[in-house]
Image (tube, rainbow, N blue to C red):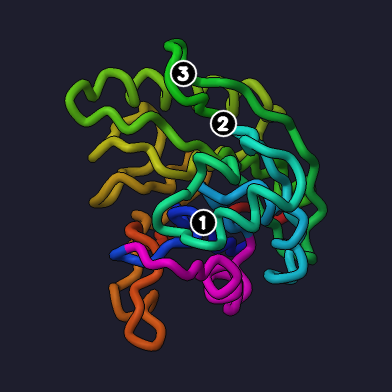
Amino acid sequence: MRLVIRSWNVFHGNADPPRRKGFLRRMVELASADRPDVLCLQEIPVWALPRIDHWSGMRSFGAVTRAPLWLGPISTWVTRAHQGLFRSGLAGQANAILVASQHEASDLGHEKINVDGRERRLVQAVRLDRAGVVVGNLHASNEFRDPSVPRAEVDRARAFVESSAQPGDAIVLAGDFNLRAPVLDGYSRAGEGIDHVLVRGASAEVAAPWVRARRTTDGIVLSDHPPVDCVVEVDAR
């Protein structure tokens, strides 16, 4: 069975450079247009979680990392007034795993991976039941001055995802690692950049980032991160 796993930090729906207008729906539609099997998203405003199933045609599993400052439509309205300025400060932030409709999937929950008092960072996991694949989606802390911080968070994420798997399951760990060239024992090799899809227990390609033109629409570059794709081959069950 061939699975396409895609990961994208959507930058709260902002462009690169940020603009007043947001482009989140366009991003989700673009990332799901060619029907990947799994789409892992980071930095989603919380107001968008109920909408991404409709935008993508996929089933989503969300995990809120920062609650909105104000509940209801107020934070949504204020943030949309200037997406590039307000970002997650008002509308909150979440991660989500989207799964194609042909797959039966189970939500395996989420866990906090940072141990300091800074912004809460999570890993979440979903199992593709028939494929026997557990997919973890994480967004590690942005701490380039001290790589040991995101490295420890990635290791906690790995431990959570592995503990959620059943014997014989393949493991996929995807997301914004905020870490270049992470090395995890038993996992596939990481590609360039800080966004990765790493695989254990199945054959996999090195995750490849989209070229800039592929995420450019009407002259606007969507997000300050490129999506990354990984093709995984698992034994059909």
Judge whether 215 appears above or below 168 on screen: below
Between residues 6 and 189, which one lies in front from this camera angle? 6
The residue furthest bottom is 218
Tag 1: residue type?
Val
For label 3, the residue is 114
Q: Secondary structure at mark 1?
A: strand
Tag 2: residue type?
Val
Dot 2 surroundings within 10 Å: few (below 14), some, or many (20 or more)? many
Judge whether 157 appears above or below 49 on screen: above
For label 1, the residue is 232
Task: Answer with mark 3 or mark 1, whichever residue precedes in sequence.
Answer: 3
Task: Answer with mark 3 or mark 2, whichever residue precedes in sequence.
Answer: 3
Q: Secondary structure at mark 3?
A: loop
- Using residue 62 as the reference point, say whether residue 225 is left or right of it: left
Query: Which corner quadrant holds the N terminus?
Result: bottom right
Between residues 144 and 210, which one lies in front from this camera angle? 144
Dot 3 surroundings within 10 Å: few (below 14), some, or many (20 or more)? many
Tag 3: residue type?
Asn
Report, in whole angstroms, how far the alpha carbon at label 3 lies from the one at label 1: 29 Å
Task: Answer with mark 2 or mark 1, whichever residue precedes in sequence.
Answer: 2
Is residue 30 one of those drawn in magenta? yes
Give the magenta range.
18-37
Is residue 205 one of those drawn in magenta? no
Between residues 147 and 183, which one lies in front from this camera angle? 147
For label 2, the residue is 123
